[in-house]
Amino acid sequence: MGKITGFLEFDRKVEAYKPVGERVQNYKEFTVPLAEKDLKDQGARCMDCGIPFCHSGCPLGNLIPDFNDAVYRGKWENASEILHSTNNFPEFTGRLCPAPCEEACVLGINEDPVSIENIEKNIVETAFEKGWITAQPPLTRTGKTIAVVGSGPAGLAAAQQLNRAGHSVTVFERDEKPGGLLRYGIPDFKMEKQIIDRRLAVLEEEGITFECGVHIGVDKTAEDLKTAFDTVVLTGGATVKRNLPIEGSDLKGVVQAMDFLGQNNKRVDGIQELGEELKATDKNVVVIGGGDTGSDCIGTSFRHGAISVSNFEIMPMGTADRPEDQPWPFWPMRLRTSSSHKEGAERFFSISTKRFVGDAKGNLKGLITAEVEWIKTPGQRPQLKEVPGTEKEWKCELVLLALGFTGSETTLAEQFGIQMDQRTNIKASEEDYKTNVPGVFAAGDQRRGQSLIVWAISEGREAAYHVDTFLMGSSDLPVKGDGDLPRV
Ligand SMILES: Cc1cc2nc3c(=O)[nH]c(=O)nc-3n(C[C@H](O)[C@H](O)[C@H](O)COP(=O)(O)OP(=O)(O)OC[C@H]3O[C@@H](n4cnc5c(N)ncnc54)[C@H](O)[C@@H]3O)c2cc1C
Ligand code: SF4
């Protein structure tokens, strides 16, 4: 694989970012692509390690050494075929995946890992540029009909796989346009939305029908779907936002991150009717929550022209290196610094917000925090304890709650009579993605809880295999680990 001495000759190289002052002026992606020579060198660093742990690090089982090798040899079309054999949408993961594959790369044991994610992005971008990504409609139709509810990465992956198996697929989406959190969660500066539209055009040409602005459970009932379709795949995501029920949480200026991000993406898309304007312009902003959503709020606030942005995280600050109890090849919980953090946010760890403070008109003017420590007792869950005497008041006019999601909505599951777990995720096993209602399947965040794009695509693909098997008795669709690859 690659060049046998490549990892000795070349250092890791990844895409650079445009300067902060330039990129915060707009919502465009700001990465600076690597030159082809650099990408080939990166492919050459893949070192024939024997057991490619990156395969198992990637939830899709992407065949990483194979496409690295193809890139090293300049066989870009073959690289694209290999990549698409396991991943329907590498243009999403190549931009947005946290790349657990790189944490599992064997070279990463004592060197910098291969820049797999950048290679992935460049393969698919080259393939689109060269016109190699074309519609692959099925040769024959089975006559079976499938409703997919929700058009995030899980729904789109399931739809494409099932359509390719010859079934007639309709994707229902309650938002104006398809894409799920890719469109109305993740900001344009991380992924411009024409990247989704470009892929949707291929899906439509393949014969998938999209019905947007249709809220299943409200505009159409579970009974309507059962009558009109042979099977239903639920991919509605984990959409119930976690609150912070403390004093002052009803003040004007305490805003859910998803309301803020969703509205901004619609604004960037040119949508006029947005309701009450949620903007960080000329405000001191506090983002509560240190994950991806929090980071996206930071970048968006800077683009609005915030005076300052502080980011609070209740957990202690991670270490730069792998913690000893999370050895290679596992995904380590260490300090991650996103491009948005680097745009000027101040980060505070082990900090808890006790109450919000408002003025006489009910507007937020500050908040009160305390430092916390996590007490670890063997055999027990860590306990949170406030450090006495550490109360502090902060001035802020906007707080963004980026505390994650508690589960999925219950209305549709109740209409179907589908069992959910305590967190309101739909109960369906990873073995076959079947719910307790025959003919109804579930995948993505609605099944596994708040997760990642790569997992959503993986679940959509796996669920499609089981839906096809349910309808036809067997399936030729690939499942994770299939080695049936186009190779040169
Ligand atoms: C702000 C933010 C940033 C993120 N950044 C990253 C990142 O950088 N990298 C990463 O890997 N992951 C990221 N994630 C997580 C990732 O976006 C999700 O894990 C992924 O989108 C889940 O895909 P899904 O298809 O299961 O659901 P979703 O993307 O949530 O899509 C579900 C869709 O179903 C629709 N829907 C729900 N119920 C109904 C109904 N009854 N009728 C019709 N339509 C319905 C919804 O409107 C939605 O469009 C981020 C999440 C957020 C919130
Ligand atoms: S999808 Fe994510 S984990 Fe898989 S190869 Fe791409 S970057 Fe790595």
Image (cartoon, rainbow, N blue to C red):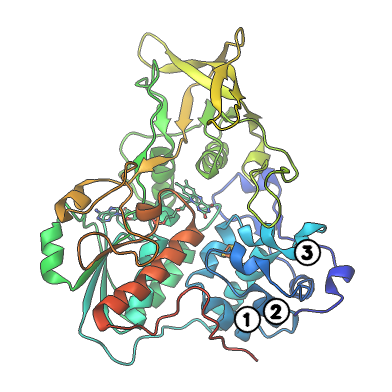
Q: CA distance from mark 2 to mark 1?
A: 6 Å
> Disc number at residue 40?
none
View extreme (front): residue: 379
Q: Which residue is mark 2?
A: 71
Q: Which label sits in the foreground, 1 or 3?
A: 3
Question: Neighbour class for label 1 at 10 Å: few (<14), some, many (≥20)?
Answer: many
Tag 3 secondary structure: helix
Look at label 2 and name its amino acid.
Val
Q: Which label sits in the foreground, 3 or 2?
A: 3
Q: Which residue is mark 1?
A: 79
Tag 1 secondary structure: helix
Look at label 1 and name its amino acid.
Ala
Q: CA distance from mark 1 to mark 3?
A: 21 Å
Q: Position of residue 473 (x, y in %)?
A: 27, 83
Sooner in the amino-acid sequence: mark 2 or mark 1 = 2
Q: Residue at x 61, y 62 (%)?
A: 57
Sooner in the amino-acid sequence: mark 3 or mark 2 = 2
